[in-house]
Image (cartoon, grey):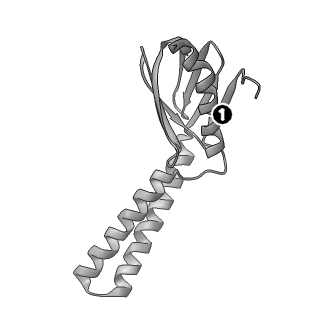
């Protein structure tokens, strides 16, 4: 397999509305609203109605916040350094970290996220798909490990 010279991706992609962790938490909270309402009002229909109302309000508020803030992350890796750009509608920050300064990293394949630790601190990573995460792992094995041996 040929060595990967550069790697980059943007987060979130336009077709990704909610992250997996967010979906898991909101479903858990909706379940709690259902159980609490069922125990308080002793009515199945009221419990379903309030759970649906809670879930709908969360989706509506989340959509509005996404449209207002317009959060974007841009990642670019090459054999020398990492460039990470965090952008919202109101603010933009850029980080440029040499690969030799990265001490360790950790990835979560289920939630599609992770972090890298460098001399400058912790740098969060977000992935849209498992393929992007696997490409990053391949890149990590090629370049991060070379400097550590």
Q: Quadrant of residue 88?
A: top right
Residue 3 in picture, x, y percent from top left: 73, 23
Q: Residue at x 66, y 18 (%)?
A: 78
Q: Is residue 137 left or right of residue 21?
A: right
Q: Residue at x 77, y 25 (%)?
A: 2
| Quadrant position of the N terminus in the picture | top right
Front-most of residues 129 and 3? 3
Residue 116 visible in the displayed image:
no
Q: Is residue 15 above or below residue 79?
A: below
Residue 91 in picture, x, y percent from top left: 51, 28
Q: Which residue is mark 1?
A: 9
Residue 149 in picture, x, y percent from top left: 52, 13
Q: Quadrant of residue 132?
A: top right
Q: Residue at x 57, y 25 (%)?
A: 85
Front-most of residues 69 and 75? 75
Counting other residues with Cα less than 10 Å from the Cα at mark 1, is it few (<14), some (14-19), or many (20 or more)? some
Q: Is residue 13 left or right of residue 35?
A: right
Q: Is residue 109 above or below residue 43?
A: above
């Amino acid at each position: 397999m040929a060595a990967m010279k550069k790697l980059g991706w943007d987060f979130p992609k336009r077709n990704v509305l909610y992250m997996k962790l967010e979906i898991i938490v909101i479903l858990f909270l909706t379940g709690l609203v259902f159980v609490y309402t069922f125990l308080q009002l002793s009515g199945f229909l009221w419990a379903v109605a309030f759970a649906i109302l809670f879930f709908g309000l969360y989706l509506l508020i989340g959509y509005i916040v996404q449209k207002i803030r317009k959060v974007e992350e841009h990642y670019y890796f090459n054999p020398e350094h990492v460039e990470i750009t965090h952008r919202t509608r109101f603010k933009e920050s850029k980080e440029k970290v040499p690969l030799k300064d990265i001490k360790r990293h950790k990835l979560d394949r289920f939630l599609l996220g992770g972090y890298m630790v460098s001399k400058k601190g912790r740098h969060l990573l977000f992935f849209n798909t498992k393929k992007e995460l696997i490409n990053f792992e391949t890149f990590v094995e090629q370049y991060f490990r070379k400097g550590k041996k």
